[in-house]
Amino acid sequence: MRFPIYQVDAFTSVVFAGNPAAVMMCEKPMPKWMMQKLADENNLSETAFLYAQDGGFNLRWFTPTTEVNLCGHATLASAHVLFSENLISTNTISFFTKSGELTVTRASTRFGEGYEMNFPAKTFVHDTAPDYVLERLGFEPIETFYAEDNWVFVCSEQQVREFDRSFIDLEGKHGVILTAQSSLDDLDIVSRYFGFKSLGIEEDPVTGSAHCAIVRYWTAVLDKTLLVCEQASARGGFMECDLRGDRVLLRGVAATFMKGECFLDAIEQTDTDADQQGPSCE
């Protein structure tokens, strides 16, 4: 069997920047074990799998080691494929995911013509991180909070940009977000994202879901609802975060790097893949 597969650089207008994601178009649900093998084979921070369903698309995201409940850059990449390849005739796409129904709309952004994603804004609680995480961090953060499986450390802009450690060998649910107010006039905040062992990602280049975790904090601190954000990884990327109640509109652009075909033997649905039935919305 042959399946179309694309690689898209998200949150950038040019290739070799932003966050690369693989997008795989399926005609029907694929067993979870096969999606995980494909994500491992692709060896990108996320691979997105989607198929047409109920006027929209069922969408799931996998790192090389696990399935995740929310992924911004692979959603942006999926929408970019559908729009740029003329696989959809409307200006808005509905994705059915483990984080509920997510919509993506064509939109003008300060970075060029792109897309607006409607995502849930995550809640957070101030807490103290485990000693082994703080020891690896190597400095005393200004503030610490926990936002749905991620530790968030508010620190200086210099600490964000110059951080050179890793959390990939440590136990934890998802990862660590470093974030700071920007000193630049045209930016509000900077951040970086580092994964724990279970996530299988040492540093994610640009992370939409991480901004869902920090948007409530920064809109309150800066007293504004629209943030211009830079993720200061080596590849780098930019997005707008527009807080609307319990939702956040993430705006960004994307660029297709390559497209091709994935060759697989016929895959049969098994009873162990019952989680594939329906849109799996929570």
Image (cartoon, rainbow, N blue to C red):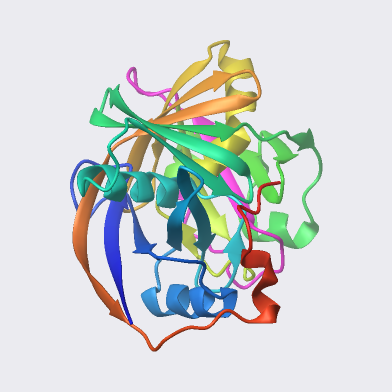
Q: Is residue 155 visible?
A: no
Is residue 128 within the magenta segment? no
Along the viewing direction, whichever of 220 and 81 lies nearer the viewer: 81
The picture places residue 6, in percent across and down from the top left corner, at: 27, 62
Q: Residue at 60% of width from left, 52% of height from top? A: 279
Q: Is residue 129 left or right of residue 140?
A: right
Q: Residue furthest bottom?
A: 265
Q: Residue at 51% of width from left, 59% of height from top? A: 61
Task: Give the prevailing secondary structure in the magenta stretch.
Answer: loop
Along the viewing direction, whichever of 48 and 279 lies nearer the viewer: 279
The picture places residue 70, in percent across and down from the top left corner, at: 57, 49
The picture places residue 93, in percent across and down from the top left corner, at: 41, 38
Along the viewing direction, whichever of 153 and 245 lies nearer the viewer: 245
Q: Quadrant of residue 250?
A: top left
Q: Is residue 178 visible?
A: yes
* Quadrant where the N terminus is found in the figure: bottom left
Query: Against 44, is 17 above or below?
Result: above
Q: Quadrant of residue 258?
A: bottom left
Boundaries of the magenta span: 162-188
Query: Against 60, is 214 above or below?
Result: above
